[in-house]
Image: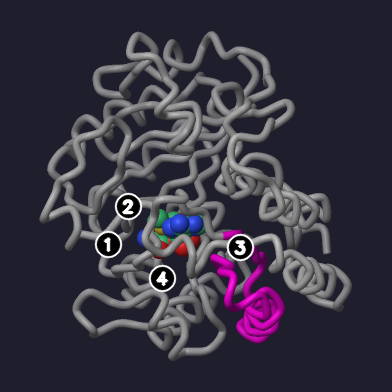
Amino acid sequence: MPRDTTLLWGLRSPCAFACPHCYFGTIEEHKQAPPIEVGVLSHLSRTDLPPRALREFARTLAGSPIERVVIAGGEPLDWPPTLEVIELIKEAGCQVVIATNGIPLTRPPVTQRLIALGVDGVSVSLDSADARTNDRLRPSRSGRFGYDDVLSGIRSLLNARGDRHTPQVGIYTVVMRERPQEITDMARLANQLGVDYYVPQPISLTPDHKLFAELAHRREDVPGVAEQLARLYNEPSRLALPDPSYARRFVAAISTQEGALVPNCFGGARLFFIQPDGSVWDCPSDRRIAATPPEHRRSIRDADARTLFADRPACTNCSLFSRDCVNMWPLVLDMPQMLNAKAIR
Ligand SMILES: C[S@@+](CC[C@H](N)C(=O)[O-])C[C@H]1O[C@@H](n2cnc3c(N)ncnc32)[C@H](O)[C@@H]1O
């Protein structure tokens, strides 16, 4: 079986940050009205799978078509069983990339374990190169953590890694309409910090989200974003970036209406999304999840990855475009290049 498939695995729901734009919604809103719709994410972890179920599924990845597992949340590294699951995924021969808010990297036992396990990539989220702006966009629940801790976590991991090739360390930045300049400001910060890769990605909100009007790009924002992306790709830098075609996709995504056609979509063919409750979807797009017929709903609970992903269809056109689609491209197509960039340089 060829190993050509990426799993985006939302392993755990809670997070120490309360980003108001988060895909997982806000705890405050969900305490008032817990989501009941299929596929809706929540930081309330009432239905998260227990560690044993996660470990059992991870063991079955050996010999499956899964090439790479991108572990996200919530916050995966605040929960000790995540490291056991990562160990099993690595033993199964998959690449592992972790998406983290960066705070757990300030704890030496965590960074040392990530290095010892041979984790391939650690993508740290930071939404502004300016400390106060970042901490406004990504507020800590307790008020105790912020930008300085994230930078200190990145530096600790880079120092602990030393001359080793892994993990490659990256920064992921959510680009919002008010601040296109973050695209190049963050690249400069990432260069100063000495990180290996950098991915700016457009904010993705449903039109009924209360922050849609304030944060989501409009047609008039497109030239400013396009100019920043052109500068990013033209300025000298030691950072690995997604393929230049990503810049075109980014601009197309914020210029396109929801529901447009995605040609040759890899969702459900070379990409699957696992929710913390174990539900398996073709991709994390809420539109695609909503369009999944009940008889096609699946779970990793008591499942074997070798059979779960055995009959994958070819990539097909999908008419459920959302801005989140562009955020999936680097995970599936650019990660191999970005994780190897230093070795090639
Ligand atoms: C949901 S977080 C989970 C992992 C970890 N807690 C973190 O902060 O990176 C994964 C990534 O999704 C991004 N993200 C969250 N909500 C988003 C949205 N509405 N649009 C685009 N990206 C978003 C985050 O900034 C982060 O880079």
Disc ID at residue 123:
none
Left or right: 47 in relation to 245: left
What range of the chain is rendered magenta? 173-202
Specify few, some or many for label 2: CA neighbours under 10 Å numbering under 14, 14-19, or 20 or more. Answer: many
Residue 33 on the magenta segment: no
Question: Is the CB atom of the residue marked by disc 2 within 8 angstroms of ligand 1's nearest atom?
Answer: yes
* Residue at mark 4: 102
Which kind of residue does numbered mark 3 sit on?
His
* Residue at mark 2: 24
* Label 3, label 2: how far apart the Cα atoms are: 20 Å
Left or right: 200 in relation to 307: right
Which kind of residue does numbered mark 4 sit on?
Gly
Proximity of marks 2 and 1: CB atoms separated by less than 8 Å: yes
Residue 338 in the image, given as x and y percentages of width and height:
70, 55
Proximity of marks 3 and 1: CB atoms separated by less than 8 Å: no
* Residue at mark 3: 217
Proximity of marks 3 and 4: CB atoms separated by less than 8 Å: no
**Residue at coordinates 50% horizontally, 46% vertically from top-left?**
96
Nearest to N terminus: mark 2 or mark 1:
1
